[in-house]
Amino acid sequence: GYQFLLSLNPAINFFRRRFGLGYWSLSAYVKQRVKDAVSFIGKFEAAVVRYAERYRVDGVLCGHIHSAAIRKFGNVTYYNCGDWVETCSALIEHFDGRV
């Protein structure tokens, strides 16, 4: 994927020059956006775990950020169902509380 984005840079910048615009790297832009998303998810998980620890719960189930995960943070288990549409991921809670 990254090599493909790199290969698009010359064509993109050819047209940018035609419109009087400076150099712009699609690959660098996408790379930074991915780093930002990973950072956001990490901060979100840490905040949720702190909240769970404050209320002394064993686990927390989340969704909506489209990043499926089951992680153990100390005594708290973090579950994120991801999304059904893009990755077909889901969580199932049993009647006895197991996820």
Image (cartoon, grey):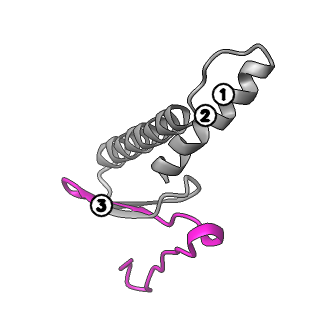
Q: CA distance from mark 3 to mark 2?
A: 41 Å
Range covered by the magenta-colored residues: 71-99
Is tag 3's residue or tag 2's residue first in the polypeptide sequence? 2
Local crowd size for mark 1, using a 10 Å CA cut-off: few (<14), some (14–19), many (≥20): some
- Horizontal side of 10 relative to 27 (left or right) equals right
Give me the disc on residue 10.
2
Q: Nearer the viewer, residue 64 or 18?
A: 18
Q: Amino acid at mark 1?
A: Asn
Q: Nearer the viewer, residue 93 or 67?
A: 67
Q: Amino acid at mark 2?
A: Pro
Q: Amino acid at mark 3?
A: Arg
The structure residue drawn at horizontal position 34% and vertical position 42%, both measured from the top left corner, is 46
Q: Residue 58: x and y, percent? A: 29, 61
SS class, disc 1: helix
Local crowd size for mark 3, using a 10 Å CA cut-off: few (<14), some (14–19), many (≥20): few
> Is residue 83 located in the magenta-colored stretch of the structure?
yes
> Is residue 40 located in the magenta-colored stretch of the structure?
no
Give me the disc on residue 43.
none
Give me the disc on residue 13.
1
- Horizontal side of 6 relative to 14 (left or right) equals left
The structure residue drawn at horizontal position 37% and vertical position 43%, both measured from the top left corner, is 42
Q: Residue 50: x and y, percent? A: 32, 41
Residue at image mark 3: 71
Local crowd size for mark 2, using a 10 Å CA cut-off: few (<14), some (14–19), many (≥20): some
